[in-house]
Image (spheres, rainbow, N blue to C red):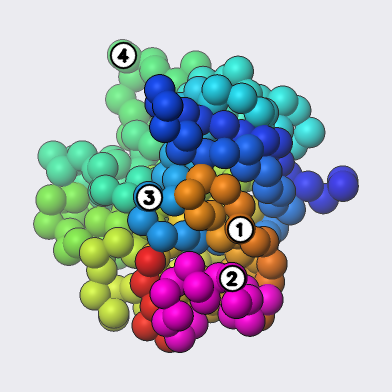
């Protein structure tokens, strides 16, 4: 159990009579890339929001690095090492690529906002930003306006912004959404380089990417965990195949 980084215990989220997550328990080890899959409406993004602190749960708890963080707001969880990215890109188009990454590093730092000090004068933040841009494959675009980036590069920048916060744990919500095959392949290659250096919970519809990346996979259906297992165990599961309407897995199936 000493290698356990994140654990959720019986997480519940309801909106009136609608139960969106139903006693969801999962555990993620340090250095693991754990994928979360399931049909549309399964509750995946809601679960991510509960883990990150964006949504407060109606029941259950979230433990991170051995501490119960269920009551902590999202910014406290981020400063504790848990950082998430979103399905929709959220960058500042009026800033350069480097400035976007520095802002992300600034937001994660303790005593973050020193309003009278130019952010690019803070060497530690710039170093964190440049290191993250290099990891994300954007070092050569650091001085470019963010508005000039392609869609795929914008997703890379969003990942760089998450890395600039120097997290221990990354929550990635559909990082390949809307990408071309070429762009998706580039992100898969990037995430392979991040494995073991970060613990990652990945929500993704692209099954080829999931099976290429994941150490373990949890299948969520109607807000409940159907199965957690290795990629081979998930591929062989009749229950999982039934959820995906009998489509061949992993090739070409998308939830």
Which residue sits at x=45%, y=21%?
112
- The residues bearing labels 3 and 2 have C-alpha atoms spaced at a distance of 18 Å
Q: Which residue is mark 2?
A: 239
Q: Measured from the top left, where is residue 149 in percent x and y?
A: 17, 59
- Secondary structure of the residue carrying numbered label 4: loop
How would you rate the neighbour count of disc 2 (Cα within 10 Å): few for under 14, some for 14-19, many for 20 or more?
Answer: some
Q: Measured from the top left, where is residue 178 in percent x and y?
A: 24, 64
Q: Earlier in the sequence, mark 1 or mark 4?
A: 4
Residue 214 belongs to the span the image colors magenta: no
Q: Earlier in the sequence, mark 3 or mark 1?
A: 3
How would you rate the neighbour count of disc 4 (Cα within 10 Å): few for under 14, some for 14-19, many for 20 or more?
Answer: few
- Secondary structure of the residue carrying numbered label 1: strand
**Mark 3 or 2, which is nearer the eye?**
2
- Do the CB atoms of the residues marked 3 and 2 lie less than 8 Å apart? no
Q: Is residue 117 left or right of residue 210?
A: left
- The residues bearing labels 3 and 1 have C-alpha atoms spaced at a distance of 14 Å
- The residues bearing labels 3 and 4 have C-alpha atoms spaced at a distance of 45 Å
Q: Which residue is mark 3?
A: 41
Residue 247: mark in rendering: none
Q: Earlier in the sequence, mark 2 or mark 1?
A: 1
Q: Which residue is mark 4?
A: 116
Which residue sits at x=20%, y=62%?
151
What is the magenta range? 233-249
Q: Is residue 226 above or below residue 252?
A: above
Q: Is residue 98 left or right of residue 173?
A: left
Which residue sits at x=57%, y=43%?
167
Q: Which residue is mark 1?
A: 226
Residue farthest along the right direction in this orientation: 1
């Amino acid at each position: 159990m000493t290698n356990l980084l994140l654990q959720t215990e019986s997480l519940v989220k309801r909106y009136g009579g609608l139960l969106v997550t139903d006693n969801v328990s999962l555990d993620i080890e340090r250095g693991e890339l754990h994928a979360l899959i399931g049909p549309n409406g399964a509750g995946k993004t809601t679960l991510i929001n509960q883990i990150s602190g964006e949504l407060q749960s109606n029941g259950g708890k979230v433990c991170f690095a051995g501490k119960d963080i269920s009551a902590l707001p999202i910014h406290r969880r981020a400063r504790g090492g848990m950082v998430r990215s979103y399905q929709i890109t959220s960058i500042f188009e009026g800033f350069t690529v480097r400035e976007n990454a520095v802002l992300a590093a600034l937001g994660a730092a303790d005593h973050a906002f020193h309003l009278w000090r130019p952010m690019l004068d803070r060497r530690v933040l710039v170093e964190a930003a440049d290191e993250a841009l290099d990891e994300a494959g954007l070092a050569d675009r650091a001085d470019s306006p963010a508005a000039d980036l392609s869609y795929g590069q914008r997703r890379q920048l969003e990942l760089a912004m998450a890395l600039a916060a120097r997290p221990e744990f990354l929550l990635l919500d559909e990082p390949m959404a809307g990408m071309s095959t070429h762009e998706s392949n580039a992100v898969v290659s990037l995430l392979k380089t991040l494995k073991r250096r970060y613990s990652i919970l990945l929500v993704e519809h692209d099954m080829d990417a999931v099976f290429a990346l994941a150490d373990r996979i949890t299948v969520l259906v109607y807000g409940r965990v159907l199965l957690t297992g290795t990629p081979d165990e998930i591929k062989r599961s009749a229950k999982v195949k039934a959820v995906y309407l009998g489509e061949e897995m992993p090739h070409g199936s998308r939830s």
